[in-house]
Amino acid sequence: MPELGSDPRRRRQYLKALGVDIYVRRGPSTVEAAEAAEVATMPEPVAVAELRPRAAPVSRAEAPLPGPEPASREFVAPAVAPTPAVQVPTDWTGLRDMVRDCSRCKLCATRTQTVFGVGLESAPLMVVGEGPGADEDARGEPFVGRAGQLLDQMLAAIGQSRDQNTYIANVVKCRPPGNRDPEADEVEACRPYLDRQIELVKPRLIVALGRIAAQRLLQSDAPLSRLRGPLYQYGAGRTPVLVTYHPAYLLRSPREKSKSWDDLKRVHQLLRQPA
Ligand code: URA
Ligand code: SF4
């Protein structure tokens, strides 16, 4: 297994930011100690086949799939009244232009600007958040506020960044007023855009950050605690999906930080498996 994270210093920073305890077993350096802790807490080895397409949710036997079938559009019943079908461009420029001028839902009335997505357009890792907050609405880029800084640290800890090898997008492209959760009709109206982004990026792995992204991708209304754990598949491409905590939640709930670190190690491991 290659070293976790390309830059040990940044990785340490992240661990510190998360408050993850590093138990020194032997060896003088913090990095070695971190590796030792990692070995101690590493989940079961993941089968090489895990990233290959499968029919079912790729889940641990003991983790029951909550509610409906896993994400696959064939099985999906619309959660709300279907929005009219829409032709969405199949190229990045066309898609970006369409989103920029979009008024398919009521969020268009209160946004400053749409927040399309950012990162490498052919990234092996795609991260999906909920929707823009105030900072993102002002800047036009996802995850640029406090939660975004933590997300960047989380990614850096496993050698990922929006500049190099990760694409970041949200379930809805416009800020819900007062940072409320996006409503079902808004999520549905914005669905074709995220779907097209996923089709264009063709990531090897999607990480859903938090309940809203997880429920959208898995077509479920289960709580995050039940969705986190199994590896799912999304859409016709059967892209593997892993669910983890939203960084904004981690800022509020320190107790989940070590579990978040477990998830990140799994992301790292999945990305480094042979295709
Ligand atoms: N939270 C999100 O889910 N997305 C953002 O872009 C910023 C904060
Ligand atoms: Fe369009 Fe999505 Fe913005 Fe709604 S949230 S106006 S569907 S881009």
Image (tube, grey):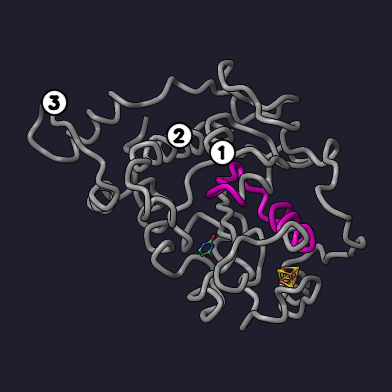
Q: Which residues are magenta?
A: 188-212
Q: Is residue 192 above or below residue 227?
A: below
**Residue 134 in the image, given as x and y percentages of width and height:** 51, 75
- Give the Cα separation between the discs numbered 1 and 2: 9 Å
The residue that disc 3 covers is 25
Circle 3 SS class: loop
- Taking the spot 17% from the left edge, 33% from the top edge, the residue there is 33
Secondary structure, mark 1, is strand
Residue at the far top in the pictured view: 61
Q: Determine crowd level at label 2: few under 14, some 14-19, many 20+ residues with C-alpha closer than 10 A.
A: some
Q: Which label is found at residue 192? A: none
- Choose top left, top right, bottom left or bottom right for residue 235: top right
Residue 79 on image: x %, y %: 81, 48
- Which quadrant of the view contains residue 55? top right
The three-letter amino acid code for the residue at tag 2 is Arg
Left or right: where 144 falls relative to 116:
left
Q: Are marks 1 and 2 in contact (CB under 8 Å)?
A: yes
Instruction: Tell me, yes or no, whether the highlighted magenta stretch contains residue 206.
Output: yes
How far apart are labels 1 and 3 at the CA level? Answer: 30 Å
Sequence order check: which comes first, mark 1 or mark 3? 3
Residue 23: where, in percent of width, then height?
17, 31
Distance between the Cα atoms at labels 3 and 2? 22 Å
Residue on which the image places disc 1? 242
| Residue at the limit of the structure toward the left, as seen here | 28
Label 2 secondary element: helix
Residue at (40, 41) in percent of width and height: 260
Residue, disc 2 = 266
Residue at (61% x, 51% y) in the render: 212
75 over 98 or under it: above or below: above
Q: Nearer the viewer, residue 123 or 66?
A: 66
Q: Residue at x 13, y 26 (%)?
A: 25
Callout 3, which amino acid? Arg
